Amino acid sequence: MLAAVVLLVDQLSKLWAVSMLSAGESVAVVPPLIRFRLLYNGGAAFSIGAGATWVFALAAAGVVVGILYAARRLASRGWALVLGLLLGGAVSHLGDRLFREPGFARGHVVDFIDYGPFVGNVADIAIFCGCVALVLLSLRGVPLSKAPGEEPLTNVSTTRSASTSPGD
């Protein structure tokens, strides 16, 4: 569900940006921290690898498959949040790569939120937040998935109350 929300908000915000902003235009939102500025990015962050857009399309597809595989046996709602944020961002970027100009698997991602040295979009924010949460869960030792034979995440409050004692 979270992945669908991220995908929808990202694509709608990009639709807005493309229809309302012109190339080269800069609109102050929270001066001097945030501006809206329309860019089409064929590469990764900071336009790295702009000539190899197809590689990013393949990488995004691999990330989507990997997240869907990992999500089969989630152990906590924290990991569900992480994977939802990452999946929504990855699917949105994959859609841009596959269906935007200049062509299939060579499309450019629409970026419009200018933070100074970085211009991104809602999917980038979701991916960044998902990565921060991933690191925090990993540092806390929260397992990503249930062991074979254990039930995957369905209702955390029921699962937790049944599997922990007051001393845990």
Image (tube, grey):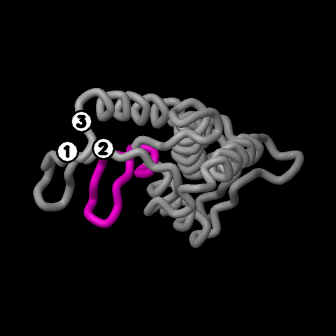
Assign the N terminus to one quadrant of the image.
Answer: top right
Q: Residues within 10 Å of mark 2 (few under 14, many from 20)?
A: many
Residue 88 visible from this viewpoint:
no
Q: Is residue 155 left or right of residue 88?
A: right
Picture residue at 26% right of the left edge, 63% below the top: 116
Q: Nearer the viewer, residue 110 or 4?
A: 110
Q: Residues within 10 Å of mark 3 (few under 14, many from 20)?
A: some
SS at badge 3: loop
Q: Amino acid at mark 2?
A: Leu
Whole-percent x, y for residue 145 in the image: 74, 52
Cα separation between marks 2 and 3: 6 Å
Residue 119 visible from this viewpoint:
yes
Q: Nearer the viewer, residue 122 or 116?
A: 116
Of marks 2 and 3, which one's residue comes earlier in the chain? 3
Picture residue at 47% right of the left edge, 43% below the top: 109
Quarter of the rendering containing residue 68:
top right
Contact, mark 2 vs mark 3 (Cβ under 8 Å): yes
Picture residue at 59% right of the left edge, 59% below the top: 166
> Disc number at residue 161?
none
Q: Amino acid at mark 3?
A: Leu
Q: Which residues are magenta?
A: 111-125
Q: Which residue is mark 2?
A: 38
Whole-percent x, y for residue 164 in the image: 66, 55
Q: Which residue is mark 3?
A: 21
- Does residue 30 lie above or below 68 as drawn? below
Q: Amino acid at mark 1?
A: Glu
Contact, mark 2 vs mark 1 (Cβ under 8 Å): yes
Cα separation between marks 1 and 3: 7 Å
SS at badge 1: loop
Q: How many marks?
A: 3
Q: Which residue is mark 1?
A: 25
Q: Is residue 116 magenta?
A: yes
